[in-house]
Amino acid sequence: MARDRGVSQFAHSLAIILALLLFTPKPSAAQSGQPAASLPTLSQNPLLGSVPTGQATSTPLSLSLKDALNRGLNYNLGVIEANEDTRAAHAARLRNLNTLLPNLSARVTSTVEEINLRTVGVRVNIPGISIPTIVGPFGVADARFVLSQELFNWSAIKSVKASTESEKASQHSYKNDRDLVVLTTIDSYLVVIADAATVDSTRAQVETAQVLFQRTSDQHKAGVVATIDELRSRVELQNQQQRLIAAENQLAIDKLTLARVIGLPNGQEFQLMDSVPYAPLAEMSLNEALQQAYAARPDYLGAKEQVRSAELTLQAAGAENYPTLSVNADFGDAGSPNFATSHGVFTFQASLNMPIFQGTRVRADKLQTNSALRQREAELEDLRGKIDDQVRTAFLNLKSSSDLVAVATSNVDLANQTLRQAQDRFLSGVADNLEVVQAQESVASAEQSYIASVYSYNVAKVSLAQAIGIAEQSALQYLGAY
């Protein structure tokens, strides 16, 4: 029941996070009439997980929105995994770069050997002369530096450049995941704020219903009103009590979700310090927002780097038919039987390898990398279209949710006036308490709509910041919470 009353913002928030390819969240399903989306599980969405850090204390923690963001950006599972992906991309670049770097090693050997000449096919027979068949033992001492170096390998050079672009793309992906963590954390924080407001509103409705029931019960005992009036007021009181129980339970669940997102210690109690009320956002034109999105969105910049990496990989595949030049050298000292009689020794070898026929391998590599390039180009254009759609949707959501706040504010005032008049009419005996019950339901509905509209407006502001690629830098500023 509480989900249909507006505290279902939690379901709405999870539906937001489900669209991880940079989206704009929609208003609450309960308040806007839109269908609810399916909820992701923790195993599907690392942004809803974290690494709990610290020790839980018996004293409730005072948690500001800024503190929640700092914890989320440090301990959220999505950020941690994205950071490790960036390190893996760096390792891949170093592995490719190693092909072009010199390989230098040192080697010291000491050998003692005795040879049976007959075992190697040496048989010398000179009449009158005795020639031994066993030679040795003799020793050889050898100490050398060994160097190998690729002087020219165009395919390897292009592969290094491709892996460098991939590393840059991974870094942009990491920044994009940080923006998503900001959106996820703020959304979870705002859900708890909305839940707390719902609990306060519902508790006030319980008190109002309690007063109405007490008055009706007293009047029924005095014979002023009928039994049905007392029953009606009692049903209304119990309905509000049920809603309060559901609202308090939803608040507790959503606080657990927030704690999981930001990595609070397991079992740590906390209280929110910020309320994040309605605050209008400074105007920005649609064209300005789109230009900023194309210039700053980390996922778009990363997609461009992926295209560049695919282009370089294709060039590297084509360069597999090019000649390669390498050198191998060693230098040091060698002596027999030891270094006392050593002399400098060295070997130098230069190799020019010219591929003549390599079967269909190079052709297959070029075909495969060309296919990957076409995919990256298509994904880039698709993302460009998504950015246009997301920024426009963010503007629409911002405008509609702002209008909803204005209407909901007026509706709350009107509903409260209606309730006061219905109460006065009932106390004056002009009407039964049916009008009071209906007016009280209208107040409850109006307050839930106001809570949901403020929540939706604040989420829309953060979604706009994320849609144009500045969530981490400007989300708190957009919310008016510095």
Image (tube, helix red, strand yellow):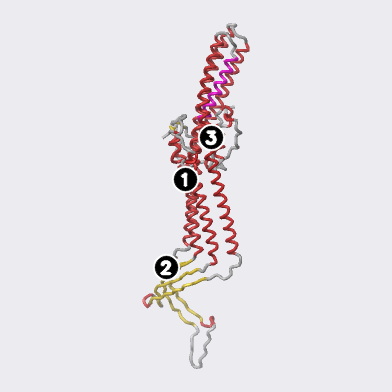
| Residue carrying label 1 | 296
- Amino acid, disc 1: Ala
| Membership of 280 in magenta stretch | no
Which one is closest to the eye, mark 2 or mark 1? 1
Q: Nearer the viewer, residue 429 or 328?
A: 429
Residue 463 at x, y percent in the picture: 50, 38
Q: Earlier in the sequence, mark 2 or mark 1?
A: 2
Q: Earlier in the sequence, mark 3 or mark 1?
A: 1
Q: Earlier in the sequence, mark 3 or mark 2?
A: 2
- Amino acid, disc 2: Ala
| Membership of 439 in magenta stretch | yes
Residue 106, numbered label: 2
Secondary structure beneath dot 3 equals helix
Residue at mark 2 to residue at mark 1: CA–CA distance: 50 Å
Residue at mark 3 to residue at mark 1: CA–CA distance: 21 Å
| Residue carrying label 3 | 397
The stretch of residues the image draws in magenta is 434-454
Mark 2–mark 1 CB contact (< 8 Å): no
